[in-house]
Amino acid sequence: MEISAKDVKELRDRTGAGMMECKNALTEAKGDLEAAIDILRARGAAKAAKRAEREAKEGAVGSYIHMGGKIGVLVEVGCETDFVARNDAFQQLVRDIAMHVAAASPVAIRREDFPADLVERERGVYREQMRESGKPENIWDKIVEGKLEKFFAEQALLEQPFVKNPDITVGQLVTEVSSKTGEKIEVRRFTRYALGE
């Protein structure tokens, strides 16, 4: 099947992938643009996983002020080179993450970063709820673990649905930008200030 230059350009414009990558994906997808996008996204995620071992020494600190100065956020996002740190897609990612933190108020970046005492306190609350519910004791642990999973998904930044596009998580957004830039990108830390808190 012959892949037209117009199709390759359209795929490149939509994904930011290289010309040959786009042509190969279109060939593999037999000319189906949406399938080619899925192929490129899957490859980008695989490449991003390979980059996870590399060190992200560069990056940027971004800020976001919301609601007439009532909420403010500082976020540090790392990448491998100064070139990518100045890239528009990377800078937009930093702004988007800062805005997301202002809106969604996550507790930590990833579930592993939660303080152990906070996790145990949540587990205790859920166990007490089970005791009050009258449900059989032999299913409590399973329900408690399910509630903890939901807690992590709602409170860990990288697992939260991205406020500008709830179909993807913040972690998937970071992976997407990482696949476009070809570098490891990581959210290092954030601080959220709310007036009176």
Image: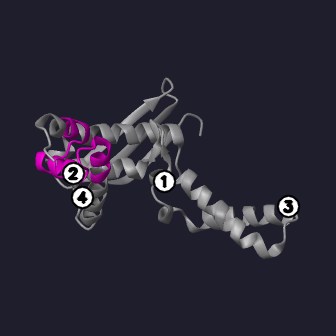
Residue 121 part of the magenta-drawn span: no
**Would residue 57 be found to the left or right of residue 19 on screen?**
right
Nearer the observer: mark 3 or 4; the answer is 3
As measured in the structure, the alpha-carbon distance from the residue carrying label 4 to the one carrying label 2 is 29 Å
As measured in the structure, the alpha-carbon distance from the residue carrying label 3 to the one carrying label 4 is 48 Å
| Predominant secondary structure, magenta span | helix
* Residue type, label 4: Ala
Q: Which mark is residue 56?
A: 4
Q: Nearer the viewer, residue 129 or 32?
A: 32
As measured in the structure, the alpha-carbon distance from the residue carrying label 2 to the one carrying label 1 is 28 Å
Q: Mark 3–mark 4 contact, CB under 8 Å?
A: no
* Residue type, label 1: Glu
Return the residue at label 2.
Answer: 25
Q: Which residues are magenta?
A: 10-39
Nearer the observer: mark 2 or 1; the answer is 2
Residue 32 part of the magenta-drawn span: yes
* Residue type, label 3: Ser
Residue at 55%, 64% in the rendered image: 115
Residue at 11%, 49% in the rendered image: 20
**Circle 4 residues within 10 Å: few <14, some 14–19, many ≥20:** some
* Residue type, label 2: Ala
Return the residue at label 3.
Answer: 133
